Image: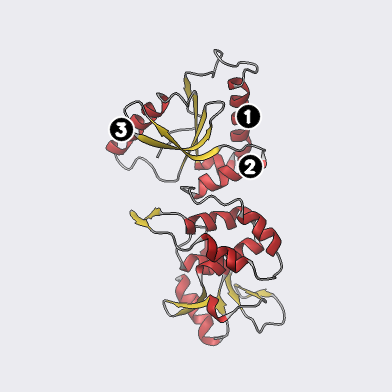
Amino acid sequence: MDLRVRLRAVQLTRPQLVVSHRSAAALWGIEMLGRVERGPLEFIDPECVIRRQGEGMLVHRMALEKEYAVLRGGLRVTDVGRTLADLLRGGPRDEALVAVESALTRRRVGGVRRPPLTTWSAIALALEAPMRGADRGRRWFRLADPNAGSPAETVARLRLHDAGLRPESQAELLTPNGRRRYLDFLFRAEGLAVEIEGYAYHGSRESHRRDIARFNEVLQCPEVRLLLRYTAADVFHRPGKMVEEIHAALSKLRGGPGGPGGPGGPGGSRNASGPGRPS
């Protein structure tokens, strides 16, 4: 059954409930990790005396000011800022930050460039409420990067952060022919570029040709000595291997074993797991 239909059926019998958390994110078109439809329907009930789960529902007992409950397609739902604040307070971290960055970023959805759904200040304001998990939510919010281009990029950056690695995100380069290119991640001091391939790429021979041309341009930039590329599957299913390879590449570029001039040193491009795309 369609998510909206299921949510509407619940609200018809329990009008005090407000669609929230992951269910609200789905209604707003916010990208999430996993299929929201497979999880329980989530609501806030300010009058609820216990937090209960069952019958495919998860009802949260928490305060909800009237200004945060809005109508969308005939459904009462938490607005975008409050929805994201609830996800940040409740976790898990990776899923919450994927949602935050999806809402803050101009991304293509269905082939159309979508404007940001909210602002930093709206999320920060919603996080000010003295609720359980607020401190943790504000701490996680500080990790958000509105330049992230996909959920895979978000999770990759978090894996690098957890490993103590702090590359530049969406680093701007000027190619020898005067074009501006943006790399998902750049360790500028070492000259290591890292590109994360999203779920969809190379829709045609022409787009494939353009990707190859962009890579060739990037590799001619003096800032780039080595380029590693990873797919979304690497990020989600083999993150340890990705981090290990990046650590090894940085060590080589810094002059460690197998450093400059050795295998994998500057001047070479290693495709770790398939095609990618500098922006």
Give the image location of residue 205, x and y in percent. 28, 36
Furthest residue toward top: 261
Mark 1 is surrounded, within 10 Å at the Cα level, by few (under 14), some (14 to 19) or many (20 or more) other residues, namely some
Residue 209: which numbered mark, if any? Answer: 3
Q: Residue at x 48, y 63 (%)?
A: 118
Give the CA separation, mark 3 to mark 2: 33 Å
Q: Check disc 1 and report its element: helix, strand or loop.
A: helix
Give the image location of residue 80, x and y in percent. 51, 67
Give the CA separation, mark 1 to mark 2: 12 Å
Q: Tell us which disc is closer to us: 1 or 3.
A: 1
Quadrant of the rendering where the C terminus is positioned:
top left
Q: Check disc 3 and report its element: helix, strand or loop.
A: helix
Mark nearer the N terminus (3 vs 2): 2
- Which residue carries the number 2 mark? 161
Give the image location of residue 9, x and y in percent. 50, 81
Mark 3 is surrounded, within 10 Å at the Cα level, by few (under 14), some (14 to 19) or many (20 or more) other residues, namely few
Residue 247: which numbered mark, if any? Answer: 1
Q: Residue at x 39, y 59 (%)?
A: 115
Residues at marks 1 and 2 touching, judged by CB atoms closer than 8 Å: no
